[in-house]
Amino acid sequence: MDAALIDALRLSYEEALGHTNALTDHISTDHFSAHYDDPPGWAIGPFVRDPALTFRLEGQWDDPTGVGWTSSAIFNPTLIARGDDLHLFYRASPRMESTASRIGHAVRRDGVWHDDPANPVVYPTLENETLGCEDPKVYEVDGRYVLFYNAIRYGNDDEGDVAVDIMGAVSDDLESWQKIGLVVPLDVSLGWAKGAVIPRDERGRAVRIGGEYLMYLSEGCGGRPMVGRSHDLVSWTFAEQPYLDLSSLPGTLFEVACAVVRGDDLVLDFFYADEQGDFAAAQALYSVAAPFTQLGLHRGGSLAWGGLQKLDGRWSFAQGWDAPRGERELYLYKEVTA
């Protein structure tokens, strides 16, 4: 690995060890997803924690970059089923919501979680990853798997601004990953894009809509609502496409978290600032036949950044925000049933 890249990774790690943010240090999953007021029939949730499914990370991984990297928090994961196994991909960071992140993998088999001895399965190796690899989103397509993640770097100015690139990796087995590089071109992202939200079904399979896969981008892109189109989840084209109107809440969009296809319904789950400027979650309803025509809107959502997955017949997701400080735990949440 290039010496300049190693030096940048070492500095990034040292800076991350001092990270603190009053807004995110006390963020709680239950604040968004434990209760909805009078939810419509199409809404997914609310959710309750299932303690039997908690994942705990023990020990520290070997650091393939050699900068002495360690983690104290795991969060923003994605779940996907393969056969009878449940695969978990998660962000590991020196501090909760800090940069200098890596991506780990674990498998739940026969009721027991096993962390992957090859971890981290995705870590900085490219020039635009010097501030970390974050927030995995995994989708199945035609028997293969595509993982999208955020590469964090400094911007191209002299003011120390941070930039975010959406990157990709592919795998045949959910274990060995090959990076494919930049997914959202810079002339689309303008140096900041988040999302890589692709409609998927209850087992994590990407769903074609109108014969193609769609990617909802939200945060970034110069404030433009952008949608990508692809036939294989690897090669994408992007165009501006409005799809979300928050005026009835009211609020301001931060980022779309996930998209769920359930029969003829398409539900977007998203993060926004409410009328008081406080963090909030909500869901929007569309028809699969018209994926940009909003039919309903309701406050309350999972903020399942890696997507919702059905477990034991109930929509479920994982998150680590509520772990005690310094404890590397991910809690699994299941939809409340009547």
Image (cartoon, helix red, strand yellow):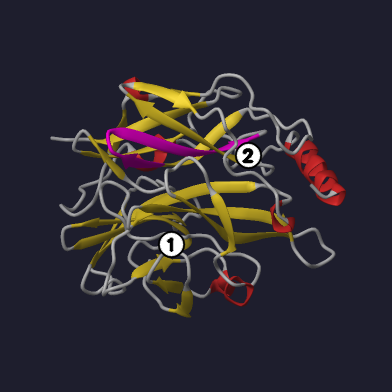
Q: Residue at x 73, y 32 (%)?
A: 69
Residue in the foreground of this view, choosing between 78 and 329: 78
* Neighbour tally class for label 1: few under 14, some 14-19, many 20 plus, Cα within 10 Å: some
Q: Secondary structure at mark 2?
A: loop
Foreground pick, 34 / 159: 159
Q: Quadrant of the C terminus?
A: top left
Give the quadrant of residue 223: bottom right
Q: Which mark is residue 251?
A: 1
Magenta-drawn stretch contains 314: no
Which callout, 1 or 2, points at the residue further toward the start of the chain?
Answer: 2
At a point 61% along the width and 19% down the height, the residue shown is 59
Q: Position of residue 62 (x, y in %)?
A: 68, 28
Residue at left offset 51%, top offset 43%: 176
Q: Position of residue 156 (x, y in %)?
A: 78, 67
Determine whether, in the image, residue 106 is placed left or right of residue 166: left
Q: Does 176 sit left or right of 307 as displayed?
A: right
Give the side of residue 314 with respect to residue 5, left or right.
Answer: left
Mark 1 residue type: Gly
The location of residue 18, given as percent across then percent down, is: 75, 35
> Dot 1 lies on which element?
loop
- The residue carrying pointer 2 sits among few (fewer than 14), some (14 to 19) or many (20 or more) residues within 10 Å by Cα, namely few
Viewer-side residue, 108 vs 329 = 108
Q: Which residue is mark 2?
A: 22
Magenta includes 85? yes
Residue at x 29% of width, y 66% of height:
208
x and y, in percent, of residue 310 in the image = 25, 41
Query: Which contiguous range is marked in magenta?
Result: 79-93
* SS assignment for the magenta stretch, majority: strand
Q: How many marks?
A: 2
CA separation, marks 1 and 2? 21 Å
Q: Amino acid at mark 2?
A: Ala
